[in-house]
Image (cartoon, rainbow, N blue to C red):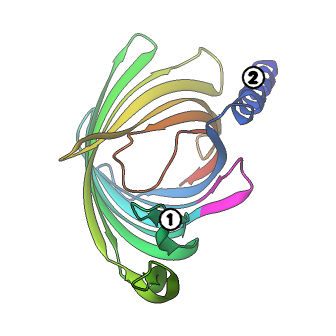
């Protein structure tokens, strides 16, 4: 228990340091349940809430379901669906003259996401090494009357505006994650670290680095504490920024 308390204080220290940097800081809260249906099949449910803007602004709610199939020892396949409700950030574009061209205020909108994954793992002593390849496809429906297009007269004076929709968008992404875990003898705390790369046809869009611990109680209750750092490519069109994240999670297995 002393070891767990030390780890918690260390994570809180990281959070304080992160909030002082120029990058953003946010929190992730995760809640899940997993049901083993047979030796090969299991079903999972999960919900998530995220914040941004130094954790002062709600960023996203989501709820998902997934099914996992054990192909053989150390190799699994899964498929899932997630409903996302996003707080989209404000966007403003400018004309060459320096006048505003289009403005999209912050608004809440939905996205639908499906994913297919293949993951493999093996043990080396008390270390476990795993690789997961996940393809995800996200559909964002059109959001009507969310964007202001400014109109100018012949003398280039602002004469009014018209409302435009934020167009629908479909986006595919490949997520590749390498993870290393360690089984501490006679301890309920399992530390792990991973790095994940998000890429599409235009190259690497973002990287996510994570360290964390899982705390298990009677194999049914799993509490998690994580620190993530995410870097975003300047060409990414989700209007995200580099961000430090502290995550708190709970999963019930039955």
Residue 246 visible: no
Mark whose residue sits in front, 2 or 1? 1
Is residue 67 left or right of 223 when viewed as pictured? Answer: left
Residue 182 location in percent, x, y?
50, 18
Query: Is residue 118 in the magenta section?
Result: no
Please, which residue is most extreme toward the left here? 201
* Left or right for 205, reference 208: left
For the point 49% across and 82% down, which residue is it?
A: 146
Q: What secondary structure is found at the residue carrying circle 1?
A: strand
Residue 241, position in %: x, y? 52, 45
Q: Is residue 131 left or right of residue 56?
A: left
Placement of 236 over or under 112, stated as above or below: above
- Magenta-span inclusion, residue 50: yes
Identify the residue shown where x is 39% and y is 84%.
154
User: Does 231 appear above or below 102?
Assistant: above
- The part of the image, by quadrant, that contains residue 80 is bottom left
x, y (%) of residue 77?
25, 48
Residue 103: horizontal and vertical position, in percent? 50, 72
- Secondary structure of the residue carrying tag 2 is helix
Q: CA distance from mark 2 to mark 1?
A: 39 Å
Q: Which residues are magenta?
A: 49-59
Q: Nearer the viewer, residue 151 or 28?
A: 151
Which is the main secondary structure of the residues drawn in magenta?
strand
Circle 2 residue: 10
Residue 254, numbered label: none
Q: In this figure, which residue is indicated by the disc labeled 1? A: 92
Residue at 44%, 84% (x, y): give it: 151
Q: Considering only order in the chain, which callout, 1 or 2, is on the residue closer to the N terminus?
A: 2
Picture quarter containing residue 202?
Answer: top left
Which image quarter holds the N terminus?
A: top right
């Amino acid at each position: 228990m002393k070891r767990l308390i030390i780890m918690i204080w260390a994570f809180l220290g990281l959070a304080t340091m992160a909030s002082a940097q120029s990058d953003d800081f946010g929190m992730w809260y995760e809640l899940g349940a997993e049901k083993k249906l047979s030796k090969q099949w299991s079903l999972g449910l999960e919900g998530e809430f995220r914040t941004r803007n130094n954790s002062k602004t709600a960023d996203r709610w989501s709820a998902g379901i997934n099914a996992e199939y054990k192909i053989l020892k150390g190799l699994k396949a899964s498929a899932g669906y997630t409903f996302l409700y996003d707080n989209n950030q404000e966007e403003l574009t400018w004309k060459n003259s320096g006048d505003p061209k289009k403005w999209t205020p912050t608004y809440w909108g939905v996205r639908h996401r499906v994913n297919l994954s293949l993951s493999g793992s093996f043990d080396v002593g008390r270390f476990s090494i795993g690789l997961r390849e996940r393809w995800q496809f996200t559909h964002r429906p059109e959001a009507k009357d969310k964007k202001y297009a400014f109109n100018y007269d012949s003398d280039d004076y602002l004469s009014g505006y018209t409302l435009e929709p934020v167009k629908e968008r479909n986006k595919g992404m490949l997520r590749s994650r390498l993870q290393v875990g360690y089984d501490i003898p006679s301890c309920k705390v399992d530390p792990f670290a991973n790095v994940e790369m998000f890429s599409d046809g235009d190259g690497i869009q973002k990287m996510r680095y994570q360290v964390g611990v899982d705390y298990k109680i009677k194999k049914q209750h799993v509490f998690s504490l994580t620190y993530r750092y995410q870097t975003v490519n300047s060409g990414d069109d989700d209007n995200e920024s580099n961000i430090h994240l502290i995550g708190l999670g709970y999963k019930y297995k039955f």
